Image (cartoon, rainbow, N blue to C red):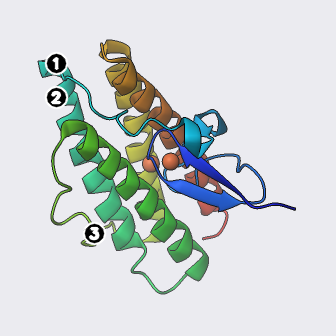
């Protein structure tokens, strides 16, 4: 078995592994976005933004910031280590999305991105809230992708929309661990 490097076209991170993972371990993008590092174009995020795209990127950054902080808040709870671990990982994925959107907007990451936020106070309540957030994100990004004129922005919003849909499955699985 030989170790190989894979690079994600969506978040730009490099993964080292024996086999191609089913999706990016960092941003969750599906396997079709994982490429040979030699094929990765480092200038991929240099895009001209229309007014609408700029506004949609701002909304995406705010959404990812809020969701990262919500999941970090969930991950602070000590009474269920399975769920604490799952939502800590999810927070990192959403933070990665925030970082991608900031790169595309050409702005720094929000200063409070990694500060745990308020939650509902119970796992059941938080998972229900998470489901609502993930459903909203999936739909919103699909809409942003549909009206984007830049192929790169369309690609990123479509990819991240699919990842947020995967998070709905995570919430459904998480409910069985309460
Ligand atoms: Fe990625
Ligand atoms: Fe998500």
Which residue is the site of mark 2? 54
Element type where label 3 sits in the image:
loop
41 with respect to 148 (left or right)? right
Give the CA separation, mark 3 to mark 1: 29 Å
Nearer to us: label 3 or label 2: 2
Give the CA separation, mark 2 to mark 1: 6 Å
Q: Which mark is residue 114?
A: 3
Whole-percent x and y of residue 32? Answer: 64, 33
Q: Earlier in the sequence, mark 3 or mark 2?
A: 2
Q: Which mark is residue 86?
A: none
Whole-percent x and y of residue 88? Answer: 46, 70
- Report the quarter where the N terminus lies: bottom right
Element type where label 1 sits in the image:
loop
Task: Name the residue located 34 percent from the left edge and 59 percent from the top edge.
Answer: 68
Q: Is residue 29 placed above or below 87 in the rendered structure? A: above
Is residue 142 visible to the viewer in this orientation of the structure? yes
Nearer to us: label 3 or label 1: 1
In this view, the residue in front, 99 or 94, is: 99
Q: Do the residues bearing badges 2 and 1 touch, measured as CB atoms within 8 Å?
A: yes
Give the CA separation, mark 3 to mark 2: 23 Å
Whole-percent x and y of residue 91? Answer: 41, 62
Q: How dense is the environment of label 3, judged by Cα within 10 Å: few (below 14), some, or many (20 and up)?
A: some
Q: Is residue 91 placed above or below 24 in the rendered structure? A: below
173 with respect to 159 (left or right)? right
Q: How dense is the environment of label 1, judged by Cα within 10 Å: few (below 14), some, or many (20 and up)?
A: few
Element type where label 2 sits in the image:
helix
- Toward the bottom, the furthest residue is 78
Which residue is the site of mark 1? 50
Whole-percent x and y of residue 149? Answer: 30, 13
Quarter of the view holding residue 141: top left
């Amino acid at each position: 078995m030989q170790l190989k490097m894979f690079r994600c076209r969506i978040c730009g991170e490099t993964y080292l592994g024996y086999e191609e993972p089913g999706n990016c371990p960092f941003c969750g993008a599906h396997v079709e976005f994982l490429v040979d590092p030699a094929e990765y174009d480092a200038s991929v995020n240099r895009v001209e933004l229309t007014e609408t795209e700029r506004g949609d990127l701002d909304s995406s950054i705010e959404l990812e910031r809020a969701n990262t902080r919500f999941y970090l808040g969930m991950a602070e709870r000590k009474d269920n280590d399975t769920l604490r671990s799952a939502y800590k990982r999810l927070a990192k994925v959403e933070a990665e999305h925030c970082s991608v959107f900031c790169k595309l907007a050409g702005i720094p990451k929000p200063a409070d991105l990694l500060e745990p936020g308020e939650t509902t106070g119970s796992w059941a309540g938080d998972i229900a809230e998470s489901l609502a957030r993930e459903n909203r994100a999936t739909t919103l990004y699909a809409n942003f992708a549909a009206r984007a004129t830049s192929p790169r922005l369309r690609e990123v919003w479509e990819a991240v929309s699919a990842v947020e849909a995967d998070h709905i499955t995570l919430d459904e699985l998480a409910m069985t661990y309460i």
